[in-house]
Amino acid sequence: MTHPILTDTRALARNRARARAEALFLHDRAALDLQDRVEMVKREFTDPLLITPYPDHWRQLVAPFPVTPRILPTAQVLEVEPGSADLVMHVFDLHWSNDPVGQLIQCRRALRPDGMLLALFLGGQTLTELRACLGQAEIEVTGGLSPRIAPMGEIRDMGALLQRAGFALPVADSDVVRVDYSSPLKLLSDLRAMGEGNALNERLRRPTRRAVMMRAVELYLQTHGDAEGRVPATFEMVTLTGWAPHESQQQPLRPGSARASLAQALSTVENPLKP
């Protein structure tokens, strides 16, 4: 059985090659968050590894980390040796990956037992305003709808990805960031400068009609704009935390091994179900 290909990897590479450092402010925010998370863990990491589509930009961002990680570019097949790291940070790539579980499996193999994974990427609330306005505008003008923004995963489903990849103690959390722009067109320009333009495999292969874009701008301003014409854009930054399995980690109790019941804790009477 073949699975549909989400991302045109050549288009994604072209988009990222045009990215500008000054537009990667979400990466700057992510670096501070990752540093805080690493420092909160009560252990010393000696062989951290960071995987990112922008290695040059991240070399500056990781300078304040307790231990400077090795940095590798993103790829379908990661060039990592099994068991070569005790911490893997995978940043801003899974939302474009055609095989996110495969990426996580490769990260797990790169970790030693009891090694830690931090994977950060854009989640399902990202660009909800733009997604809705573009969709409505295209339907009104052309009578159809084409893929324009990647269908990013919902956080409630993300922990399952870690479990499928073989990680223990999976946790998924998110940070919703609202950014104000001077106009919807400035937002579109910024997305191109971030390397986050449309790289969907099923996208239109011709320029979008001007009438569609102008109607989308009009809808954006009507729905979300303020009196000065400024508009918000939502970015959801999801972080997955997991651990390579090890016998020292907490294990689930065997069913039926509990020594106290919920009824006892609540000081109430337990009424067993009738057979």
Image: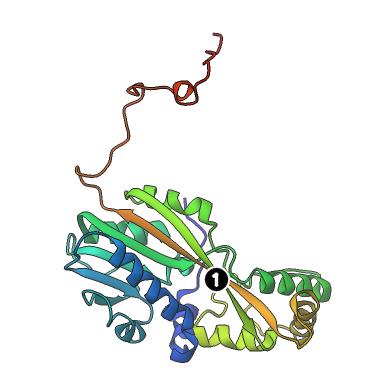
Question: Residue placed at 50% from the left, 84% from the top?
Answer: 194
Is residue 191 something one can see in this rendering? yes
Percent position (x, y) of residue 166? Answer: 32, 48
The residue to which callout 1 is attached is 201
Please tell me in which quadrant of the rendered image residue 226 appears: bottom right
Residue shown at 19% from the left, 44% from the top:
248
Q: What kind of element bears circle 1?
A: loop
Q: Relative to residue 76, is residue 172 depicted above or below? A: above
Within the image, what quadrant is residue 136 found in?
bottom right
18 left or right of 50 in image? right
Residue 76 can be seen, yes or no: no
Q: Is residue 144 left or right of residue 241?
A: right
Q: Position of residue 227 (x, y in %)?
A: 79, 85
Task: Identify which residue is drawn at 79% across, 77% down.
Answer: 219
Image vertical order of residue 27 relative to residue 274, above or below: below
Quarter of the image with the C terminus is top right
In the rendered picture of this protein, how many numbered marks are placed on residues? 1
Q: Residue at x 44, y 77 (%)?
A: 29
Q: Position of residue 45 (x, y in %)?
A: 20, 65
- The type of colouring in the image is rainbow
Seen as rendered, the residue at the extreme top is 275
- 207 sits left or right of 9 in the view: right
Inspect the image, locate mark 1, and give the three-letter code of the amino acid beneath it. Asn
Number of other residues with Cα within 10 Å of mark 1, as a class: few under 14, some 14 to 19, many 20 or more: some
Q: Nearer the viewer, residue 6 or 166?
A: 166
Foreground pick, 145 / 180? 180
> Where in the figure is residue 135, as x and y percent of width and height?
73, 70
